[in-house]
Image (cartoon, rainbow, N blue to C red):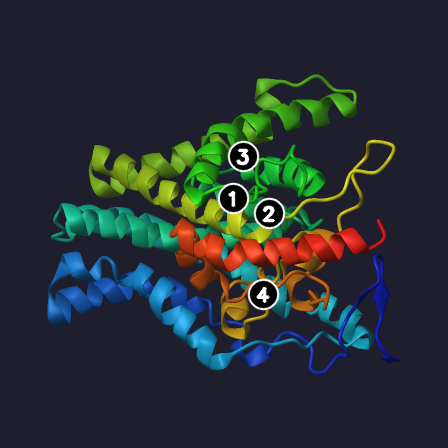
Amino acid sequence: MWSGHRTLRGGMHTPPPAEPYGHRRFAFLWFLLAALPPFIAWAAASRWGHWDAWAWYTPSQFFILFPLIDTLVGRDRRNPDPAREAELERDRYYPALTLLCVPLQLGAMLWGAWAYTQAPFGPLGQLGWLVSMGCLGGVLAINTAHELIHKPSRVEQTAGGLLLASVLYGSFKVEHIYGHHVDVATPADGSTARRGETVYGFIARALRRNVGRAFELERHHTSRRGRPWRVWRSEVLGWFAVSAGLAAACMLLAGGWQGLIYFAGQAFFAICLLEVINYIEHYGLQRRQLADGRWERVDPRHSWNSDFLFSNLMLFQLQRHSDHHAHAARRYQVLRRFDTSPQLPCGYACAVVMALLPPLWRHVMDPRVDAHDRVMERAPA
């Protein structure tokens, strides 16, 4: 059982445990997200009309309602009891929830293609529908894939790749693991935002760089295993081929080229949401370079953490990002929080809105970056 505080590298302490993560009866709340697009169609068709306004319903929930719920529900600073971690790790309930996202995301995304052309949307409504489906893909597809691709199971790895392919970002599977997790919080990482960098410049840099970086890393990884890189063996190209098949399915359901516009549009907004989250997760944080030129090891001080309960339930504990980067293989239900991890002032939904307003973001976050830098300067490497 627990005896006092547990000390990790760098003098970090975890708080004493209470109830483990899980809130088992609430862990399925994310399922409500998959119900949003059908609810929009039902509400507009059967009740209130105003299709163009209803098309924007999903982002309004994400970025207005969810931050309010976060504020009302508050934070959860509890950690799983170490004596129960092994039991929680083996519990099949939690990975089953992530795998359930595969049929839900694929079904919602493909149904969305049909609705894109069948619903009486005007241009503003079509844009709103693409944003809505992109928000859904950012959570159901990319966020869930992020959990799955870190796991050793071939089933989970494949499920994560399928989810990423549904938003045209299969390259993330390679770049994230072999690039971001190795280089995080260093100048070499394209997914670590620099202090003072706007989210718009960061997104442009990520879109310009990360796909090519995935191919580069794949070639390097293949070479290290003593095998030549071949087009037909490329995992990145394989997932893009899956994306092409899904795009063709969207064209069939939508009755033509509008299906391709839909597929590319929802993917673009899903990817942009991912990159905004990447911006938030590591903004301004840097690992120190050691005397021998290497970078210090990644630990929970190198990612922003957020303990808001509601948004963590909706995001498979993604906001406990500090522990994820320090221990990438840990399953979401046993991720911990650390007192010395830098803390965001809000959940991700609110942070996304702040990030899109650069003066507000810098006003709130730059003093926190500076305060954390001062703590890091005093801490042993």
The residue drawn where x is 56% and y is 44% is 195
Disc 4 residue type? Ser
Report which quarter residue 25 is drawn in. bottom right
Q: Is residue 80 left or right of residue 305?
A: right
Q: Which residue is mark 1?
A: 196
Helix, strand, or loop for circle 2? loop
Q: Is residue 369 left or right of residue 140?
A: right
- The mark that comes first in sequence, 2 or 1, is 1
- The mark that comes first in sequence, 4 or 2, is 2
Helix, strand, or loop for circle 1? loop
Mark 1 in CB contact with mark 3 (< 8 angstroms) = no
Q: CA distance from mark 4 to mark 1?
A: 21 Å
Report which quarter residue 250 is drawn in. top left
Provide residue 27's location: percent of width, then percent of height: 54, 73
Q: CA distance from mark 4 to mark 2?
A: 16 Å
Disc 3 residue type? Ser
Helix, strand, or loop for circle 3? loop
Disc 2 residue type? Gly
Foreground label between 1 and 3: 1
- The mark that comes first in sequence, 3 or 4, is 3
Q: Which mark is residue 284?
A: 2
Q: Which mark is residue 171?
A: 3
Between 82 and 183, the residue placed more toward the observer is: 183
